[in-house]
Image (spheres, rainbow, N blue to C red):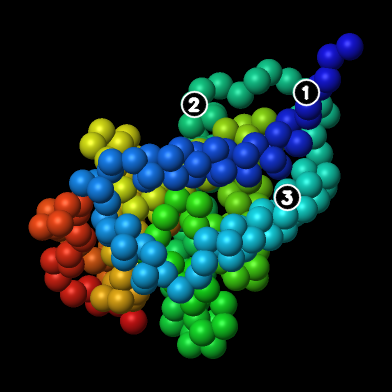
Amino acid sequence: MGFAVSDELLGTFAPILVYWLYSGIYVLLGSGSLDNYRLHSKKDEDEKNLASKGAVIKGVILQQVIQAVVAILLFTVTGSDAEQTGPRPSLIVLARQFITAMLVLDTWQYFMHRFMHINKFLYKHIHSQHHRLVVPYAFGALYNHPLEGLLLDTVGGALSFLLSGMSPRVSIFFFSFATIKTVDDHCGLWLPGNPFHLFFRNNTAYHDVHHQLYGTKYNYSQPFFVMWDKILGTHMPYSLEKRADGGFETRPLKEGKGE
């Protein structure tokens, strides 16, 4: 007798599993001889961050529990793939759904993220938790205040799912991809040949600028494109320069027009 796992269950838990597997790869890589590819030294990671690794793990797990509950409720309300009839969507339809979901997620996260920086109360009591990681690393990608995790990531994901019209089965692939992208943006490594660095201008170095003191009012866009930063004057270009002690450093090229 086989054991069948529903698309709804996979859509709920696959991105969580992918998060820990993919970030685990970076943990293993970071423990090796990759100092020449770090955007910050290991010493800076240990000394500048204001949250312990244990606190980060607990914070991420809490967000993922909330995320799973919302996903189960969403799939319950919208129905399952098993209830859907008709031909499978074409590659063109799937591509349209992916692109629509990416644009919706980017738009929601840009404006919510920027608002949490502009509003001093929200920044102090909610968003500043994420910025305790001055030197980002992979499994800290979803280290947020629970309310921020709900508003930015979970609600943003729900909107992208609903407005794109994707099915639970398609959502497995989309949210696993979005999870990998988010982890990669926080990995702190500029590895040669990384496809995310080749195809996305919103990447590890781009988001690293935002985590630095000079960049907290810029580069709000996440996780895919940089269009809203460019349109609304919060885009900060940067250069990647070699550090004398090994690795790279992101340096701003000019001031933006952000808040």
Residues under labels 1 and 3: Cα distance? 26 Å
Disc 3, disc 2: CB below 8 Å?
no
Q: Residues within 10 Å of mark 2 (few under 14, many from 20)?
A: few
**Comes first in the chain, label 1 or label 2:** 1
Q: Can residue 228 be seen in this view?
A: no
Q: Where's the C terminus, which quadrant? A: bottom left
Q: Mark 1 points at which residue?
A: 85
Nearest to viewer (mark 1 / mark 3)? 3
**Residue at the (20%, 51%) spot, across then down:** 247
Kind of residue sitting beneath label 2: Ile
Element type where label 2 sits in the image:
helix
- In percent of width and height, residue 171 lies at 62, 37
Q: Name the residue under label 2.
A: 92
Kind of residue sitting beneath label 3: Ala
**Comes first in the chain, label 1 or label 3:** 3
- In percent of width and height, residue 214 lies at 26, 76
Question: In terms of image quadrants, where is residue 29?
Answer: top left
Does residue 145 appear left or right of residue 44 in this picture? right
Residue 8 vertical position relative to residue 90 in the rendered view, above or below = below
Element type where label 1 sits in the image:
loop
